[in-house]
Amino acid sequence: MRLTVLSSLDVLCRQQACEVLAAQYPAAVVVLHDLLEDGVVIRRIFGRSGPIGREETLLEHGCLSCTVRLDVVPTIEGLLAEGAEHIIIGLPPAVPASMAVDALKSGLIAPVVIDSVVLACAPDALEDHIWDHHTIFESGFTAAPDDQRTPGEFMIGELAFSDTVLLSEPELVPVDPRERARGVQLLGHLAPHALITENACDMGPGRHDYEEATARMVPGVVRVPAGSSASAFMTVARELQRPLHPERFRHALSTLAQGCCWLRGRLWIAAVPEHRIVIQGIGPRIWLENTGPWLAGQRPVPASNRANKDGMALDRRYDSFDRGTVLAVTGENIDAAEITRLLAECELTDAELANGLTSLQDPFDLTTAH
Protein backbone atom coordinates (compact mmCIF):
# COMPACT_ATOMS: atom_id res chain seq x y z
CA MET A 1 0.00 0.00 0.00
CA ARG A 2 1.29 3.43 -0.95
CA LEU A 3 0.44 6.67 0.82
CA THR A 4 1.44 10.05 -0.64
CA VAL A 5 0.91 13.27 1.33
CA LEU A 6 0.84 16.51 -0.63
CA SER A 7 0.96 20.02 0.83
CA SER A 8 0.89 23.44 -0.79
CA LEU A 9 0.56 27.13 -0.10
CA ASP A 10 -1.69 27.82 -3.05
CA VAL A 11 -4.84 25.90 -3.94
CA LEU A 12 -4.08 26.14 -7.68
CA CYS A 13 -0.68 24.52 -7.16
CA ARG A 14 -2.29 21.75 -5.14
CA GLN A 15 -4.95 21.17 -7.78
CA GLN A 16 -2.43 20.88 -10.58
CA ALA A 17 -0.12 18.64 -8.54
CA CYS A 18 -2.99 16.31 -7.62
CA GLU A 19 -3.99 16.08 -11.27
CA VAL A 20 -0.41 15.23 -12.23
CA LEU A 21 -0.17 12.54 -9.55
CA ALA A 22 -3.59 11.10 -10.39
CA ALA A 23 -2.63 10.88 -14.06
CA GLN A 24 0.60 9.12 -13.17
CA TYR A 25 -1.16 6.73 -10.77
CA PRO A 26 -4.69 6.22 -12.20
CA ALA A 27 -5.54 3.51 -9.68
CA ALA A 28 -4.92 5.86 -6.74
CA VAL A 29 -7.66 7.32 -4.55
CA VAL A 30 -7.34 11.07 -4.02
CA VAL A 31 -8.51 12.67 -0.76
CA LEU A 32 -8.87 16.47 -0.67
CA HIS A 33 -9.67 18.68 2.32
CA ASP A 34 -10.60 22.36 1.99
CA LEU A 35 -11.72 25.12 4.34
CA LEU A 36 -14.66 27.23 3.21
CA GLU A 37 -15.14 30.81 4.36
CA ASP A 38 -18.03 29.89 6.67
CA GLY A 39 -15.83 27.64 8.82
CA VAL A 40 -16.88 24.41 7.12
CA VAL A 41 -14.20 21.87 6.21
CA ILE A 42 -15.13 19.81 3.18
CA ARG A 43 -13.59 16.44 2.42
CA ARG A 44 -13.88 15.03 -1.11
CA ILE A 45 -12.71 11.62 -2.30
CA PHE A 46 -12.04 10.81 -5.94
CA GLY A 47 -11.40 7.47 -7.61
CA ARG A 48 -10.60 6.37 -11.13
CA SER A 49 -14.15 7.07 -12.33
CA GLY A 50 -14.71 10.36 -10.47
CA PRO A 51 -16.13 11.48 -7.08
CA ILE A 52 -16.82 8.66 -4.63
CA GLY A 53 -17.34 10.52 -1.37
CA ARG A 54 -18.05 13.93 0.19
CA GLU A 55 -18.34 15.01 3.83
CA GLU A 56 -18.58 18.35 5.64
CA THR A 57 -17.50 19.11 9.21
CA LEU A 58 -17.27 22.28 11.28
CA LEU A 59 -13.88 23.78 12.04
CA GLU A 60 -12.59 22.18 15.25
CA HIS A 61 -11.68 24.79 17.91
CA GLY A 62 -11.06 27.30 15.12
CA CYS A 63 -8.02 25.28 14.01
CA LEU A 64 -7.88 23.93 10.48
CA SER A 65 -4.93 21.63 11.16
CA CYS A 66 -6.75 20.09 14.15
CA THR A 67 -9.86 19.47 12.09
CA VAL A 68 -7.93 17.79 9.29
CA ARG A 69 -5.91 15.73 11.77
CA LEU A 70 -9.07 14.41 13.42
CA ASP A 71 -10.65 13.55 10.06
CA VAL A 72 -7.74 12.15 8.08
CA VAL A 73 -7.12 9.04 10.23
CA PRO A 74 -10.67 7.55 10.08
CA THR A 75 -10.88 8.51 6.40
CA ILE A 76 -7.71 6.60 5.53
CA GLU A 77 -8.74 3.69 7.79
CA GLY A 78 -11.98 3.39 5.83
CA LEU A 79 -10.25 3.48 2.46
CA LEU A 80 -7.74 0.85 3.54
CA ALA A 81 -10.58 -1.37 4.72
CA GLU A 82 -12.11 -1.02 1.25
CA GLY A 83 -8.87 -2.22 -0.33
CA ALA A 84 -7.29 1.00 -1.57
CA GLU A 85 -3.68 0.33 -2.57
CA HIS A 86 -2.51 3.90 -3.21
CA ILE A 87 -3.95 6.97 -1.50
CA ILE A 88 -2.99 10.55 -2.32
CA ILE A 89 -3.84 13.06 0.43
CA GLY A 90 -4.11 16.64 -0.82
CA LEU A 91 -4.01 18.84 2.27
CA PRO A 92 -5.68 22.27 2.42
CA PRO A 93 -3.39 25.17 1.51
CA ALA A 94 -1.03 26.13 4.36
CA VAL A 95 -1.68 22.96 6.39
CA PRO A 96 1.68 21.31 7.19
CA ALA A 97 2.40 17.82 5.93
CA SER A 98 4.18 16.93 9.18
CA MET A 99 0.87 17.26 11.04
CA ALA A 100 -0.86 14.77 8.76
CA VAL A 101 2.06 12.33 8.79
CA ASP A 102 2.32 12.43 12.59
CA ALA A 103 -1.43 11.80 12.89
CA LEU A 104 -1.31 8.87 10.48
CA LYS A 105 1.72 7.26 12.09
CA SER A 106 0.24 7.48 15.58
CA GLY A 107 -3.47 7.03 14.80
CA LEU A 108 -3.79 4.25 12.24
CA ILE A 109 -4.52 0.82 13.65
CA ALA A 110 -2.19 -0.94 11.24
CA PRO A 111 1.28 0.50 10.59
CA VAL A 112 1.50 2.34 7.28
CA VAL A 113 4.48 3.41 5.23
CA ILE A 114 4.45 7.00 4.00
CA ASP A 115 5.71 6.62 0.47
CA SER A 116 6.40 10.27 -0.25
CA VAL A 117 5.73 13.74 1.17
CA VAL A 118 5.38 16.22 -1.66
CA LEU A 119 5.30 20.02 -1.69
CA ALA A 120 3.51 21.54 -4.68
CA CYS A 121 5.30 24.77 -5.55
CA ALA A 122 5.23 27.40 -8.30
CA PRO A 123 8.94 28.29 -8.41
CA ASP A 124 8.41 31.68 -10.05
CA ALA A 125 6.39 32.77 -6.97
CA LEU A 126 8.81 31.41 -4.36
CA GLU A 127 10.75 34.61 -3.72
CA ASP A 128 7.53 36.59 -3.39
CA HIS A 129 6.35 34.10 -0.76
CA ILE A 130 9.65 34.34 1.13
CA TRP A 131 9.56 38.15 1.27
CA ASP A 132 5.83 38.51 1.94
CA HIS A 133 5.47 40.27 5.33
CA HIS A 134 1.73 39.57 5.56
CA THR A 135 0.22 36.58 7.32
CA ILE A 136 -1.03 33.62 5.32
CA PHE A 137 -4.59 34.79 5.98
CA GLU A 138 -3.87 38.37 4.95
CA SER A 139 -2.29 37.14 1.71
CA GLY A 140 -5.40 35.09 0.91
CA PHE A 141 -3.95 31.58 1.17
CA THR A 142 -6.28 30.42 3.95
CA ALA A 143 -9.69 31.32 5.31
CA ALA A 144 -8.42 30.84 8.89
CA PRO A 145 -7.90 34.36 10.30
CA ASP A 146 -5.91 33.25 13.36
CA ASP A 147 -3.00 31.84 11.32
CA GLN A 148 -0.15 34.26 12.03
CA ARG A 149 2.53 32.51 9.97
CA THR A 150 3.89 34.26 6.92
CA PRO A 151 3.92 32.45 3.56
CA GLY A 152 7.70 32.21 3.83
CA GLU A 153 7.55 30.51 7.22
CA PHE A 154 5.17 27.90 5.86
CA MET A 155 7.30 27.27 2.76
CA ILE A 156 10.54 26.86 4.70
CA GLY A 157 8.92 24.40 7.09
CA GLU A 158 7.42 22.35 4.26
CA LEU A 159 10.66 22.32 2.30
CA ALA A 160 12.42 20.89 5.36
CA PHE A 161 9.94 18.06 5.88
CA SER A 162 9.17 17.14 2.26
CA ASP A 163 11.26 14.72 0.25
CA THR A 164 9.93 15.93 -3.12
CA VAL A 165 9.09 19.33 -4.61
CA LEU A 166 6.65 18.97 -7.50
CA LEU A 167 6.89 22.07 -9.65
CA SER A 168 3.55 23.55 -10.64
CA GLU A 169 2.66 26.07 -13.29
CA PRO A 170 -0.89 27.36 -12.80
CA GLU A 171 -2.27 28.64 -16.08
CA LEU A 172 -4.02 31.78 -14.79
CA VAL A 173 -0.92 33.96 -15.20
CA PRO A 174 1.81 33.54 -17.85
CA VAL A 175 5.07 32.40 -16.30
CA ASP A 176 8.38 34.13 -17.05
CA PRO A 177 10.86 31.30 -17.82
CA ARG A 178 13.68 33.28 -16.21
CA GLU A 179 11.76 33.70 -12.96
CA ARG A 180 10.86 30.02 -13.00
CA ALA A 181 14.50 29.01 -13.47
CA ARG A 182 15.53 31.41 -10.71
CA GLY A 183 13.00 29.86 -8.35
CA VAL A 184 14.27 26.36 -9.10
CA GLN A 185 17.80 27.54 -8.27
CA LEU A 186 16.60 28.92 -4.95
CA LEU A 187 14.83 25.64 -4.17
CA GLY A 188 18.17 23.87 -4.54
CA HIS A 189 19.52 25.95 -1.64
CA LEU A 190 16.42 25.85 0.54
CA ALA A 191 15.89 22.09 0.15
CA PRO A 192 19.19 20.45 -0.86
CA HIS A 193 17.86 17.05 0.25
CA ALA A 194 14.75 17.08 -1.95
CA LEU A 195 13.96 15.76 -5.41
CA ILE A 196 12.87 18.80 -7.44
CA THR A 197 10.92 17.75 -10.50
CA GLU A 198 8.05 18.54 -12.86
CA ASN A 199 7.35 14.88 -13.58
CA ALA A 200 5.57 12.54 -11.19
CA CYS A 201 7.25 9.63 -12.93
CA ASP A 202 10.56 10.75 -11.36
CA MET A 203 9.17 9.98 -7.91
CA GLY A 204 10.34 6.52 -7.02
CA PRO A 205 8.65 4.59 -4.19
CA GLY A 206 9.86 4.83 -0.62
CA ARG A 207 11.37 8.29 -0.80
CA HIS A 208 10.21 9.49 2.59
CA ASP A 209 12.42 8.90 5.63
CA TYR A 210 10.44 10.07 8.66
CA GLU A 211 13.37 10.11 11.06
CA GLU A 212 15.47 12.10 8.63
CA ALA A 213 12.61 14.52 7.90
CA THR A 214 11.98 15.26 11.57
CA ALA A 215 15.73 15.73 12.15
CA ARG A 216 15.78 18.40 9.42
CA MET A 217 13.05 20.30 11.28
CA VAL A 218 14.89 20.51 14.61
CA PRO A 219 15.30 24.23 15.43
CA GLY A 220 18.88 25.32 14.83
CA VAL A 221 19.79 22.51 12.43
CA VAL A 222 21.84 23.73 9.48
CA ARG A 223 21.72 22.05 6.09
CA VAL A 224 23.70 23.34 3.14
CA PRO A 225 23.98 22.23 -0.51
CA ALA A 226 26.60 19.53 -0.95
CA GLY A 227 28.40 21.40 -3.72
CA SER A 228 28.45 24.63 -5.67
CA SER A 229 26.50 25.08 -8.88
CA ALA A 230 25.73 27.83 -11.36
CA SER A 231 23.05 29.79 -9.54
CA ALA A 232 21.94 33.32 -8.79
CA PHE A 233 21.97 32.32 -5.11
CA MET A 234 24.59 31.07 -2.72
CA THR A 235 24.70 29.69 0.79
CA VAL A 236 27.47 30.63 3.19
CA ALA A 237 27.87 28.63 6.41
CA ARG A 238 30.24 29.44 9.25
CA GLU A 239 31.14 27.77 12.53
CA LEU A 240 32.59 29.67 15.50
CA GLN A 241 34.21 28.23 18.61
CA ARG A 242 34.06 31.27 20.88
CA PRO A 243 30.97 32.89 22.45
CA LEU A 244 29.52 35.93 20.72
CA HIS A 245 29.51 39.37 22.30
CA PRO A 246 25.74 40.11 22.48
CA GLU A 247 25.92 43.82 21.68
CA ARG A 248 28.37 43.43 18.80
CA PHE A 249 26.25 40.60 17.37
CA ARG A 250 23.11 42.73 17.67
CA HIS A 251 24.74 45.43 15.56
CA ALA A 252 26.08 42.91 13.02
CA LEU A 253 22.75 41.12 12.64
CA SER A 254 21.13 43.71 10.35
CA THR A 255 24.09 43.50 7.96
CA LEU A 256 24.10 39.69 8.05
CA ALA A 257 20.39 39.57 7.24
CA GLN A 258 20.37 42.22 4.53
CA GLY A 259 19.08 40.71 1.28
CA CYS A 260 19.06 37.27 2.89
CA CYS A 261 16.25 34.90 1.92
CA TRP A 262 16.99 32.51 4.75
CA LEU A 263 19.16 32.87 7.85
CA ARG A 264 19.31 29.97 10.29
CA GLY A 265 21.42 28.25 12.90
CA ARG A 266 22.26 28.26 16.59
CA LEU A 267 24.19 30.81 18.61
CA TRP A 268 26.49 30.72 21.64
CA ILE A 269 25.86 34.16 23.13
CA ALA A 270 28.04 35.25 26.02
CA ALA A 271 25.17 36.84 27.99
CA VAL A 272 23.40 33.43 28.19
CA PRO A 273 26.32 31.03 27.78
CA GLU A 274 24.59 27.93 29.15
CA HIS A 275 21.69 28.15 26.71
CA ARG A 276 21.39 27.20 23.04
CA ILE A 277 19.93 30.14 21.11
CA VAL A 278 18.23 29.37 17.81
CA ILE A 279 18.14 32.02 15.12
CA GLN A 280 15.77 31.98 12.16
CA GLY A 281 15.34 34.64 9.52
CA ILE A 282 12.89 34.15 6.67
CA GLY A 283 12.57 37.11 4.34
CA PRO A 284 11.63 40.18 6.42
CA ARG A 285 11.22 38.30 9.73
CA ILE A 286 14.09 37.43 12.09
CA TRP A 287 13.73 35.95 15.55
CA LEU A 288 15.87 34.38 18.25
CA GLU A 289 14.68 31.74 20.70
CA ASN A 290 16.18 30.19 23.81
CA THR A 291 15.79 26.41 23.40
CA GLY A 292 17.34 25.45 26.73
CA PRO A 293 20.71 24.11 27.87
CA TRP A 294 23.38 22.89 25.50
CA LEU A 295 23.92 19.14 25.52
CA ALA A 296 27.18 19.87 27.29
CA GLY A 297 25.09 20.97 30.27
CA GLN A 298 22.97 17.82 30.34
CA ARG A 299 24.11 14.65 32.07
CA PRO A 300 23.78 12.16 30.57
CA VAL A 301 23.57 13.44 27.02
CA PRO A 302 20.06 12.52 25.75
CA ALA A 303 20.21 9.42 23.58
CA SER A 304 17.78 10.96 21.11
CA ASN A 305 20.27 13.72 20.41
CA ARG A 306 23.28 11.43 20.22
CA ALA A 307 21.46 9.32 17.63
CA ASN A 308 20.18 12.25 15.57
CA LYS A 309 21.35 11.33 12.07
CA ASP A 310 22.04 14.68 10.52
CA GLY A 311 24.97 13.88 8.30
CA MET A 312 25.34 17.21 6.48
CA ALA A 313 28.10 19.80 6.59
CA LEU A 314 28.46 21.79 9.83
CA ASP A 315 25.82 19.78 11.68
CA ARG A 316 27.77 16.79 12.87
CA ARG A 317 28.21 17.52 16.58
CA TYR A 318 25.75 15.76 18.85
CA ASP A 319 28.12 14.87 21.67
CA SER A 320 28.86 16.67 24.94
CA PHE A 321 31.02 19.28 23.18
CA ASP A 322 28.19 20.88 21.26
CA ARG A 323 28.60 24.49 22.40
CA GLY A 324 29.37 26.86 19.57
CA THR A 325 27.82 28.98 16.86
CA VAL A 326 26.74 27.50 13.55
CA LEU A 327 25.17 29.96 11.13
CA ALA A 328 24.11 29.70 7.48
CA VAL A 329 23.01 32.51 5.17
CA THR A 330 21.24 31.97 1.83
CA GLY A 331 20.60 34.77 -0.60
CA GLU A 332 21.73 36.66 -3.67
CA ASN A 333 25.00 38.61 -3.84
CA ILE A 334 26.14 37.18 -0.51
CA ASP A 335 29.66 38.34 0.43
CA ALA A 336 31.27 35.36 2.14
CA ALA A 337 34.34 37.34 3.21
CA GLU A 338 32.17 40.05 4.77
CA ILE A 339 30.15 37.49 6.70
CA THR A 340 33.35 35.88 7.98
CA ARG A 341 34.69 39.27 9.08
CA LEU A 342 31.47 40.30 10.82
CA LEU A 343 31.20 37.08 12.77
CA ALA A 344 34.87 37.09 13.73
CA GLU A 345 34.44 40.59 15.15
CA CYS A 346 31.52 39.35 17.24
CA GLU A 347 33.58 36.68 19.02
CA LEU A 348 34.84 37.47 22.51
CA THR A 349 38.46 38.52 22.78
CA ASP A 350 40.93 36.88 25.15
CA ALA A 351 40.50 39.76 27.56
CA GLU A 352 36.71 39.48 27.49
CA LEU A 353 36.89 35.74 28.09
CA ALA A 354 39.13 36.36 31.08
CA ASN A 355 36.52 38.72 32.56
CA GLY A 356 33.84 36.02 32.49
CA LEU A 357 30.75 35.50 30.33
CA THR A 358 27.81 36.33 32.56
CA SER A 359 28.81 39.96 33.21
CA LEU A 360 27.54 41.04 29.77
CA GLN A 361 24.08 42.50 29.23
CA ASP A 362 21.51 40.59 27.16
CA PRO A 363 19.97 42.97 24.57
CA PHE A 364 17.76 40.16 23.17
CA ASP A 365 16.07 39.21 26.48
CA LEU A 366 16.94 35.53 26.02
CA THR A 367 17.24 34.42 29.62
CA THR A 368 14.05 32.32 29.56
CA ALA A 369 13.87 29.07 27.60
CA HIS A 370 10.74 28.34 25.54
Image (spheres, grey):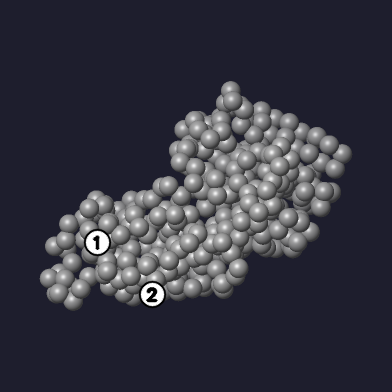
Is residue 179 depicted above or below 276 in this figure? above
- Crowd tier of the residue under label 2, counting other residues whose Cα lies within 10 Å: few below 14, some 14–19, many 20 or above: some
Is 69 left or right of 135, judged from the image as shown? right
Determine the secondary structure under disc 1. helix
x, y (%) of residue 52?
80, 35
Along the viewing direction, whichever of 276 and 99 lies nearer the viewer:
276
Q: Is residue 357 visible?
A: yes
Which of pointers 2 and 1 lies earlier in the amino acid sequence?
A: 1
Residue at 37% across / 59% down in the picture? 256
Q: Which mark is residue 44?
A: none
Residue at 22% across / 70% down in the picture? 348
Residue 74 quadrant: top right
Residue at 60% across / 43% down in the picture? 9
x, y (%) of residue 305?
43, 67
Determine the secondary structure under disc 2. loop
Q: Amino acid at mark 2?
A: Asp
Q: Amino acid at mark 1?
A: Arg
Is residue 151 depicted above or below 40 in this figure? below
Which of the two discs, 2 and 1, sits closer to the camera? 1
Q: Quadrant of the N terminus?
A: bottom right
- Label 2, label 1: how many angstroms apart (C-alpha)? 29 Å
Q: Which residue is mark 2?
A: 319
Q: Which residue is mark 1?
A: 248
Is 289 left or right of 79, judged from the image as shown? left
- Crowd tier of the residue under label 1, counting other residues whose Cα lies within 10 Å: few below 14, some 14–19, many 20 or above: some
x, y (%) of residue 266?
37, 63
